[in-house]
């Protein structure tokens, strides 16, 4: 421990002696610099230097652009954008119109029309049917006279199906002919043969519950027949022995039909759709129609 302490003290003493020793002090000798200033005049040295040789300025040859006449590109004539045609289905004979000057028939307007052909669930998707208005409709600045023709397309249809589901036909009215001009329209059927149509679906009667009742009636009728048979057998002294058998059989069949009628009715079909020509319908506009 003492050795380490003595070592530290010796090391510190050497450092202090090194810092304060005058031998290591620096002293600059400026006498040589003063002698040079007396002998040589710095301003005259610059004048005695030889002049630098003159050189020609470097010339960079840049090729001149060739003078070519450029003709402006030809611009194709700009044609004004065509005005949109009205309606959902764009017909070839639709006229262009300006809404600011066209006569508008408001959406929600209803027309009473009659069918020009039979409308039934036999019509397939894409078939077309027509109607003719039977009463005039008055709007602002215009009256849609009777005799205006409407055309509809069959969007969906099917025949009566099992589970008592009836036939179906969905019509979309897409054109109207007024004063010799055909306009695209977007309309639906709200009444068919004086009956309300919901969601534009003309449907045949659903007869599932009717099928259930028919099954119960069949069991009941069979039971009545067996009762009559038992009564006739009871009048005969020989048949009185077997007379209860028909009645018991009728009761069993009646019970089976009554309990199983909801299942048996699944195989029953719904009602057909067949609306004769000349039947009255109601058409309702779903969008505005413009006349020009």
Image (cartoon, rainbow, N blue to C red):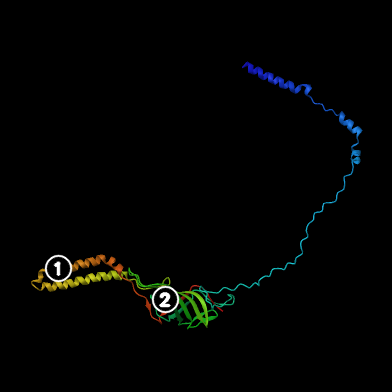
Residue 200: quadrant of the picture:
bottom left
Q: Which residue is mark 1?
A: 245
Judged from the image, the secondary structure of the residue bearing numbered disc 1 is helix
Residue furthest to the top in view is 2
Q: Which mark is residue 191?
A: 2
Instruction: Tell me which label, 2 or 1, sits earlier in the chain.
Output: 2
Is residue 117 found left or right of 260 in the rendered image? Answer: right
Residue furthest to the left in view is 237
Is residue 21 found left or right of 75 in the rendered image? Answer: right
Which residue is rendered at x = 69% and y = 20% of the image?
A: 11
Query: How far apart are the two marked residues, 2 and 1, measured between alpha carbons?
Result: 55 Å
Measured along the vertical axis of the image, is residue 9 above or below residue 239? Answer: above
Measured along the vertical axis of the image, is residue 130 above or below residue 213? Answer: below
Location of the N terminus (image quadrant): top right
Q: Which mark is residue 13?
A: none
Which residue is rendered at x = 10% and y = 70% of the image?
A: 240
Q: Residues within 10 Å of mark 2 (few under 14, many from 20)?
A: some
């Amino acid at each position: 421990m003492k050795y380490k302490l003595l070592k530290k003290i010796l090391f510190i003493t050497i450092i202090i002696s090194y810092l304060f020793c005058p031998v290591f002090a620096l002293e600059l000798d400026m006498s040589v610099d003063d002698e040079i200033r007396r002998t040589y005049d710095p301003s005259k040295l610059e004048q005695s230097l030889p002049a630098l040789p003159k050189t020609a300025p470097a010339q960079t040859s840049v090729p001149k652009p060739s003078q070519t006449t450029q003709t402006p590109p030809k611009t194709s004539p700009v044609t004004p954008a065509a005005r949109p045609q009205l309606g959902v289905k764009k017909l070839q004979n639709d006229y262009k119109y300006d809404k600011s000057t066209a006569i508008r028939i408001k959406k929600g307007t209803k027309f009473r029309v009659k069918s020009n052909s039979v409308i039934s669930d036999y019509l397939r998707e894409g078939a077309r049917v027509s109607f003719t208005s039977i009463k005039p409709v008055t709007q602002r600045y215009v009256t849609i006279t009777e005799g205006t023709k409407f055309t509809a397309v069959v969007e969906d249809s099917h025949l009566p199906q099992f589970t008592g589901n009836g036939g179906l036909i969905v019509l979309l009215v897409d054109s109207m002919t007024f004063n010799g001009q055909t306009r695209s329209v977007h309309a639906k059927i709200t009444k068919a043969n004086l009956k309300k149509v919901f969601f534009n679906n003309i449907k045949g009667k659903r007869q599932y519950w009717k099928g259930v009742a028919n099954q119960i009636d069949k069991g009941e009728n069979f039971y009545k027949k067996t009762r009559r048979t038992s009564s006739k057998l009871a009048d005969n002294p020989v048949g009185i022995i077997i007379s209860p058998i028909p009645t018991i059989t009728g009761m069993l069949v009646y019970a089976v039909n009554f309990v199983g009628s909801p299942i048996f009715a699944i195989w029953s079909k719904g009602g057909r759709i067949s609306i004769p020509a000349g039947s009255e319908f109601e058409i309702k506009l779903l969008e505005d129609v413009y006349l020009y």
